[in-house]
Amino acid sequence: MSIDFKRNSVFNGILCLESEFYGKRRVVLWNPTTNEFRLLPLPEKNPAWKLFADHYQIGYDHIKDDYKMIRCTRYSPKIVPIYHVPSEHLWEMYSLNSNSWKKIDADVPHSYCSIEHAYLNGVCHWLDKTETDVYLVSFDFCKESFITTPIPSYVYDSLDFHLVRRRLMVLNGSIAFMVHDTEASTFHISILGELGVKESWTKLFVVGPLPCLGHFVGAGKKGNILLRKKDSELAWFDLITGMIGVTTERFY
């Protein structure tokens, strides 16, 4: 039996785990602190289609005091021509209170769905893209609705968005979008002013070049960002002072 930890499905200490045993899939919500778990009922599926990929996000509806989870599933027909493999997307939402799934309508891009996400004020955000554009997709767990916000080209400067690393984070109470130019060792950071408004993205600054720093790890409450150095040591960068440290003491 294989157990798959869904990296994008962690919220308030609750983890989503998926296992498959002899072709039978199980999805479990688990709280490792209390050791409580909930075996979720599986949504109905069309027997003529096979599962291609799925994507989970957990959140909290503070109005109904209900933990919810959305699931985007890509299906493809079991019998298709060898050179043509179409797929369709199905969005569903699970409610812990009702212990049931329901389908939800979603008019969002479907080319690619990032596993990275950011959660702020009851809304879960992640990146999606087509061949030509990048979007911020947001799901409000209280309203059970989607909002799509295009990301304008000016946040990339002259960079090719196909060749850079993109990350979302919560920075000083706002959704921030970071572009990492690995060749120049620079980090381009922008924040969103209003959901759904493309022009509300504001380019804050460009950090670097910092050739000693590699991957982005996370953002702290004090406005610092945590990065992994190329020697695998962790370092924090203070966005206000421009100082770099190799201890995480000031990060939290």
Image (spheres, rainbow, N blue to C red):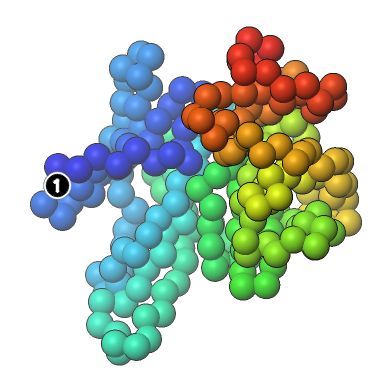
Location of residue 9 in the rendering, given as x and y in whole percent from the top left corner: 46, 38
**Which residue: 34% across, 88% down?**
83
Is 47 on the left or on the right of 58, as rendered?
Answer: left
As drawn, the residue found furthest toward the top would be 249
Residue 212 shows up from this direction: yes
As drawn, the residue found furthest toward the left would be 22
**Residue 186 lies in quadrant:** top right
Location of residue 197 in the rendering, given as x and y in whole percent from the top left corner: 84, 55
Count neighbours of disc 1 (C-alpha within 10 A) and say few if under 14, some if 14 to 19, many if 20 or more.
few
Quadrant containing the N terminus is top left
Location of residue 136 in the rendering, given as x and y in whole percent from the top left corner: 68, 53
Amino acid type indicated by mark 1 = Phe
Count of numbered tags: 1
Label 1: which residue? 21
Q: Is residue 111 above or below residue 54?
A: below
- Report the front residue among 208 and 64: 208
